Image (cartoon, grey):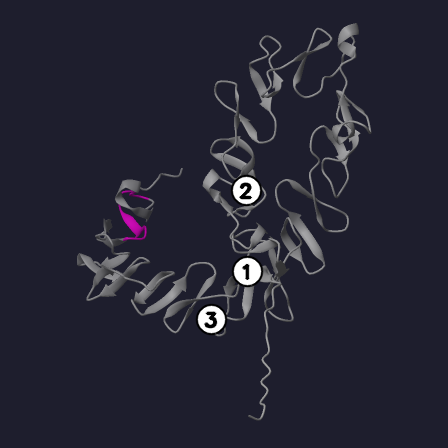
Amino acid sequence: MCVPCPLSSNCQTCNVNNSTQCLNCFPNSFLVNGVCSSCIFPCVSCQSTNQSSCLSCPSGYLLSNNSCLSAQCPIYCTSCSSNSNCFQCISGYVPYAGSCVPCLTGCSSCSTVSPGMCLACAVGTYLDSTSQQCLSCFINCQLCLPNGCTTCMNGYYLTSSLTCAPNCISPCATCSTTNPTNCLTCMLGYVYNPRALQNCSPDLNCSSTFSCVSCPLGFIFSNLQCIPCSSSCARCSPISNSTCTSCYNGRYLNSNSQCVSCPTGCANCLSKSTCLTCASGYTSLTLTSVNNPSACAPCNSPCALCQGSPNICTGCVSGYALGAGKCISNFNFGFSVTLSVTAG
């Protein structure tokens, strides 16, 4: 039978015949006569004769005369041995000559010997084996290789040509790969009509004959008819058309069964604090999904579109061209002066 060691005593392993006698301690503790005693914060380890006499310190502290002192590390540094000797930096920076220097644009980690040599790239870029620099993926691509995209951003799907096309917009069942509002076929409750908006018209003729089997968005199926919902609802309760059960993109269902607009910068959300897709001109600062509205950050000009970072451009404003994740001005200004001398 297994008997637990007393966790309250910081005991990691104990005597099989006497569970109160510790053999090994958890970190931040030391063993004396079968008992684990805790070091005094902020010591990570300490002398067995003195709980406040530190032997090692946590990140952000310096060991000096057996004491852990709060370190004033250099800017962008997460761990250092002095205010002029950093050995660990935030993502996108590398320790160099005691401080943190930036990697090239789009680079999440780079060589400590040569900061210009990239080792890993940020979201929306890939590592070029020839130049050792991070180059931009195709637009709306989250992860890619030199020959094309492998994973698309939320709201897009991967095509057979390894590019990212936007998901079809309701009421499209299928759509053009270049235009998500150009329906090729329609959802249930709609009929294909080339003269209609998005090529799909609501099918409501069934209501007059009580022969409906499905309804378009904005209506609810009830007694073989399609009953209109409140204007903000995509679907509603058959008992009350003002009680929403689902919402259109750009809105979420709140606790009062009403559809409320998503926060600024968020194109599609589940709640006020859970965004699924950022709006055009914004980017998610997380790898896979957006956890809160503030994670949708606006692109920094002259980026019109960006990915993974407000400074990693995937599209540019007018007058700029895209190159290696940056927007470069198309304007080249030059002049010449010709001097002539005439005899007086």
Q: Earlier in the sequence, mark 2 or mark 1?
A: 1
Give the number of marks: 3
Counting other residues with Cα less than 10 Å from the Cα at mark 2, is it few (<14), some (14-19), or many (20 or more)?
some
Q: Give the residue displayed 67% in from the left and 58% down from the top.
A: 145
Can you tell which of label 2 and label 3 is closer to the viewer? 2
Q: Are marks 2 and 3 in contact (CB under 8 Å)?
A: no
Crowding around mark 3 (Cα neighbors within 10 Å: few <14, some 14 to 19, many 20+) is some
Q: Quadrant of the C terminus?
A: bottom right
Q: Nearer the viewer, residue 102 or 205?
A: 205
Query: Which residue is the site of mark 3?
Result: 112
Helix, strand or loop for disc 3: loop
Labels 3, 1: front one: 1
Q: Is residue 87 above or below residue 246?
A: below
Labels 2 and 3: the sequence-earlier one: 3
Cα–Cα span, label 2 and label 3: 31 Å
Residue 162, how many percent across, how many down? 73, 51
Are circles 3 and 1 on residues that touch, CB within 8 Å?
no
For the question of whether residue 192 can be seen, the reply is yes
Q: Which residues are magenta?
A: 17-28
- In the image shown, does 304 or 143 lie closer to the viewer? 304
The N terminus sits in image quarter: top left
Question: Can residue 306 be seen?
Answer: no
Q: Position of residue 134 (x, y in %)?
A: 59, 63
Q: Label 3 sits on what residue type?
A: Thr
Question: Label 1, on which residue?
Answer: 106
Amino acid beneath label 1 = Gly
